[in-house]
Amino acid sequence: IRYKAELAVEINRLKTERNAVILGHNYMEPILYHAISDFIGDSLELSRKAAATDKDVIVFCGVKFMAETAKILNPTKTVLLPSDAGCSLAASITAKDVRDLKARFPGVPVVTYVNTYADVKAESDICCTSGNAVAVVESLGAQTIIFLPDEFLASNVARETGKHIIFPSLTKPTVPDSQLDYQMIGWKGRCEVHEKYTVEDIRTIREQYPDVLILAHPECSPEVTAASDFSGSTMAMIRYVENTHAPHYLLLTECSMGDNIAAANPEKNMLRLCMVRCPHMNQITMENTLKSLKQNKIKIEVPEEIRVKAVRAVERMIAIG
Ligand code: 13P
Ligand code: SF4
């Protein structure tokens, strides 16, 4: 504990010396979350903080797509990521995949989840996060949209907006496009953490705790979110727990967030079903955050021709809220 406390003191000292801000995602382990982050939040809130900061350096305690979004929004700042932390969703789609979809479904607006890399955002009309996906889709007022790349988030949004979704195979079309019936076109990317929760998990917990309130992130399957009591972004889940009084709570999301909420709400009875720690978020430690500030690494760069296209999609999203 003493060693961690000394690390925290040194990080906070360097943060002041370098005129830096530390943005910590809700999935950071408790010490990063509570001891060194200036702002904590979900992807949407941290994007807003990144856009608004007047500090010289932004250290992103999160994953690469989040740090890239900060650079896209605030390009004159030095943006540092303590470790090369990826994301299974961001890795599931390339800019060429998006171009191929646009060529196959011309004129259909493309909504892209922020859990993607800058070149994919650059091919998109508008981004969204789990916190505003429904609002973004509804803001377009379009009959048909392409929604990438999370299969489950897309299916959850389709259900909420009453749209019929399909996942067309680009390699082996089984039905001619003219015969397809769709209002949303999705992609088969998945979060390797949230895809693991099942309706069977929910059934087992409800048998043992019939009065449990279950919250699921919208990257969980539509069957899991339908069987839960609430679904929302990481920040929406935190607020929901804070503003309700249930005998027991169960979070179907990344385990560190459960630790953080339990620590912030000691009077609440949080059941633990901590099956999965995101291996990418888990790469961020106190040690590499300190190293990042000392050595100015890993410096995030986005080529300007990509950034100017991506920023349109991200700013359009932020304007919606
Ligand atoms: P939030 O925007 O809800 O924080 O989600 C980010 C993420 O990576 C969830 O797995
Ligand atoms: Fe990506 Fe899932 Fe990890 Fe979030 S929890 S960073 S979506 S792999």
Image (cartoon, rainbow, N blue to C red):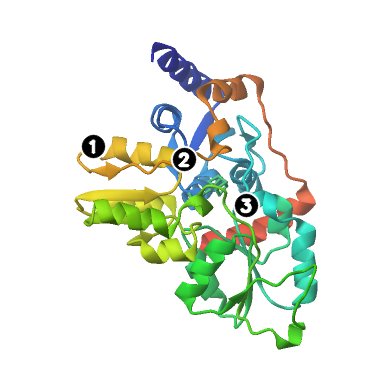
Residue drawn 48% across the image and 37% down it: 24
Depth check, front residue: 307 or 237: 237
Residue under numbered circle 1: 266
Q: Is residue 269 above or below residue 207?
A: above
Say if disc 1 is inside 8 Å of ligand 1: no
Say if disc 3 is inside 8 Å of ligand 2: yes
Residue drawn 61% across the image and 41% down it: 67
Amino acid identity at mark 2: Tyr
Is tag 2's residue or tag 1's residue first in the polypeptide sequence?
Answer: 2
The numbered disc on residue 89 is 3
- Tell me which corner region of the image, top left, top right, bottom left or bottom right, holds residue 64: top right
Could you tell me residue 88's position as x and y percent? Answer: 63, 48
Residue under numbered circle 2: 27
Depth check, front residue: 308 or 265: 265
Left or right: 318, with 75 as reference point: left
Amino acid identity at mark 1: Pro
Amino acid identity at mark 3: Leu
Could you tell me residue 46's position as x and y percent? Answer: 50, 46
Is tag 1's residue or tag 3's residue first in the polypeptide sequence?
Answer: 3
CA gap, disc 3 and disc 2: 16 Å
